[in-house]
Image (cartoon, coloured by chain):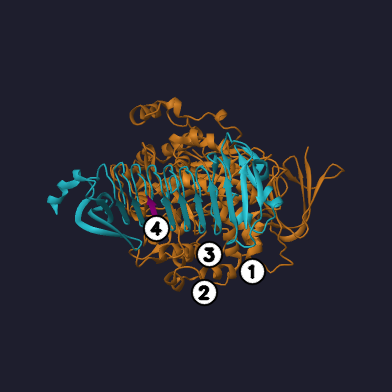
Amino acid sequence: MTVFLRPKYAFKVPVNAQNITPDAFVSKTIEEIKMLEVFEGNKRRTLGELFEITGEDGKSLEETRIQITGDLLKVKRIGEAMTSGEIAIEGDVGMHLGEKMKSGTITVAGNAGSWLGAMMRGGTITVKGNVGDYVGAAYRGSTKGMKGGTITIHGNAGSEVGCFMRKGIIKIYGNAGQFVGMHMHDGTIFVQGDTEGRAGASMTEGKIVILGNAASVLPTFTIDDVKKKVKINGEEVQGPFYLFTGDIAEKGNGKLYVAKAKNPHLGFYEKYL
Amino acid sequence: MTELLIKNGFVYDPLNKINGEKTDIAVRDGRIVEKVEGGRVKKINASGMIVMPGGVDIHTHVAGAKVNLGRMLRPEDHYKDVEPKTAKTRSGVGYSIPSTFTTGYRYAKMGWTTVMDPAMPPLKARHTHEELNDIPILDKATYPLLGDSWIVMETLSDGRIDECAAYIAWELNATKGYAIKIVNPGGLEAWGFGRNVRNIDDAVPNFNITPREIVRGLCKVNQLLHLPHTIHVHTNNLGKPGNYENTLKTMQCVEDLAHDSRPQIHITHCQFSAFAGSDWRTFESAADKISNYVNAHNHVTLDMGQVVFSDTTTMTADGPFQFILYQLTGNKWVNGDVETETSSGIVPFHYKRSSYVHATQWSIGLELALLIKDPWKILLTTDHPNAGPFIAYPKIISWLMSQKARERVMKKINKKARRKSLLPTIDREYTPYEIAIATRAGQAKALGLKNKGHLGIGADADIAIYGLNPEKTDLGKNPRMIRRAFKHAAYTIKDGQIVVKDGEIVKSVNGRTFWVNVETKKVSVENRILREKFEKYYTVQYDNYLVPEHNLAFSAPIQVQAEV
């Protein structure tokens, strides 16, 4: 039971599409779905005006699947607060995808914008391409970031991944920007590639694992041990890793694992063990 | 020429002793009149509905430098509560610190028409009035913070009461203020040097004076100036366990100044000042002790400062208290020092049901309101946004009117707090008449607003109509109905114009700003002396300090003849 959406034209201004969720689509006919409200810039529009909509919706939330094909870089807030079902995006997508989502699945074949899965509570988001900044972060000013669920990114991510994260897992198979796991309270972040440094700034609890090069480790982290391997959600990742704890400036007890192999510049820490 | 006739409503007008009788209310040109006739009269059928005077809020932080800083500090607060523009209204945001226009609309939707901003640092008067100008529909006023002013403390410690009175009269005129606000007397000045006062008899550092002398002195000044409102006091030691003793002392200290049973002191957001215990673990309610005192004395009015379980923003002029709150929560914070006048602070705060302290605070507010027998003495506020945003008033009204509603919340709160709460022993339920006192008549009376809070001939035609039938519904059993009715007024009428219909804004009108223009017999204050003080103490020039009347978009001065 899939509803197919395709943009009718290339959007020039941001489209606020918080109504593209299984929760809004369920038990509606295609005609009814076409009448759902979206904002294109400051203009109130219907979904039918912006998208070609075909297919058939599910009778229950779990069965509802939404497939969107095309360039959605200007489309924001898809899947906001969704509680079940599936959204598949064949192309690139804009900011705030899956923000505050509670459950369900989102997959993106292309790239995604910033604030991916911000403040999410549960569910799964998978992105094949790259994403912007603030993955699983808290909204500006808020201290309540991601609280659960899994975000998997096969490309690169921007800065401040998992800012104010409280629970859940973020896996990045590419590189990540600065401040990975900033203000993190709990949860796990795994970066297979390189990071630009300052990982774990102000973190109090939680786990950050960096397999690639970490440009620097903050002076408010102390070396604790060298570990052969580390477990992420039951899966073992082979090291060895330097284990740092911090951020001491916040009286934190977060764990920062940095792979030894790619980080010879951190070797001097060993003499403090 | 707008003429209105509100027919067949159950009218609750406590100042004119009308208790739910079916009466017609006639309005012409923004005033209540005896009758209107003719074909052009617009009739409102209020049968089966409650008609009350427009709501009055004696204490709500809606404008000023501090409120605006709170807005800037909390983008996440606005993000979750956005109001798009409509044909009649502007766009805006909530939640705990709504934008100016949204503030006006949301109050009006609940049937409130007059609000008082209670904390204006005199130096920020211009900013405060700019914001008040931008709040639509409501009539407003603001109280300058005068309890920690150097000039006040200097003159009072020398016993120069007349001179202090002249200064206050000048200050009310210069800042276009309405009443004397005292926050943590002496403590804010001490905070400028990293200290505080803990007790009403502690000496204020650098000044030969105690908080008791400040409160007493300003109470006398208030009497000398014949100000419409009493002194408006936020007590020392607010928000700390065991502070109720100090609150009692503050009320007692002006007992001998009382005469003709008029109130002489208003203790604001009393919930925060009614804590017993010696630390947060032994913390408990002292509402019974406060209410015993208030029941036996007539010189005090209080307002509740009722806690609502929500994510809100605390903001007061009490800088030292806000610093303690920051240490407790670890949240982001702002703390400010306003030169020779006052201080300020802002900390976001989340009141949680599961917390023993927060749940007990929730209980204290309601205990105060229910244990104080005379509803004229305890007024409904949340000290918006400190204990909760004002949009929670309908919820609080339902708690006051329905034991069932209180029990429903009791089931969900912290177990220890539930066990210790006095609420299960209280079966009092407010009647609509008492609600009209606590939310309108009592507030207007305490404020000395002659044309507000009642529906007598000549009063301002500020009227709220709620879709609630007290004859057909057992209100105590239907708290949800109460909440719904007070959340969306069927009609709100401001100055004789219908501004809200069925909970939606249909017209946006402008509200006035009240201020007190005190005429003193002597030359107010010797200009030369004041100029010298400004040269010596202030970062602004004397001439730039004064707020000219044309800065108020809709100025409504209240003329007062002082004794001195």
Residue placed furthest toward the left: A271
Give me the C-alpha separation between circle 1 and circle 4. 43 Å
Which numbered disc flags the more N-terminal residue, 3 or 1?
3
Is disc 1 surrounded by few (<14), some (14 to 19) or many (20+) residues within 10 Å? Answer: many
Q: Which residues are magenta?
A: A167-172
- B87 or B7: nearer the eye? B87
Chain identifier matching the orange colour in the rendered picture: B
Q: Residue at x 59, y 70 (%)?
A: B404
Question: Decide: marks 1, 4 in contact (CB < 8 A)?
Answer: no
- The residue mark sitting in front, 2 or 4, is 4
Inspect this view and state whether residue A170 appears: yes
- Disc 2 and disc 4 on one polypeptide chain: no
Q: Quadrant of residue B93?
A: top right
Residue type at the position of mark 2: Thr
Q: Which residue is mark 3?
A: B372
Q: Are marks 2 and 1 in contact (CB under 8 Å)?
A: no
Would residue B444 be counted in the magenta stretch? no
User: Mark 3 and mark 4: span between their CA atoms?
Assistant: 47 Å
Dot in front, 1 or 4: 4
In space, the residues marked 3 and 1 are separated at their CA atoms by: 19 Å
Q: Residues within 10 Å of mark 3 (few under 14, many from 20)?
A: many
Q: CA distance from mark 2 to mark 1?
A: 16 Å
Q: Nearer the viewer, residue A51 or B542?
A: A51
Q: Amino acid at mark 4?
A: Lys
Give, as a three-letter code, the residue at label 3. Answer: Ile
Give the chain of mark 3: B
Query: Does dot 4 land on a helix, a strand or a loop?
Result: loop
Chain drawn in cyan: A
Q: Amino acid at mark 1?
A: Gly
Q: Is residue B18 left or right of residue B296?
A: right
Q: Which residue corresponds to mark 2?
A: B425
Occupied quadrant, residue B199: bottom left
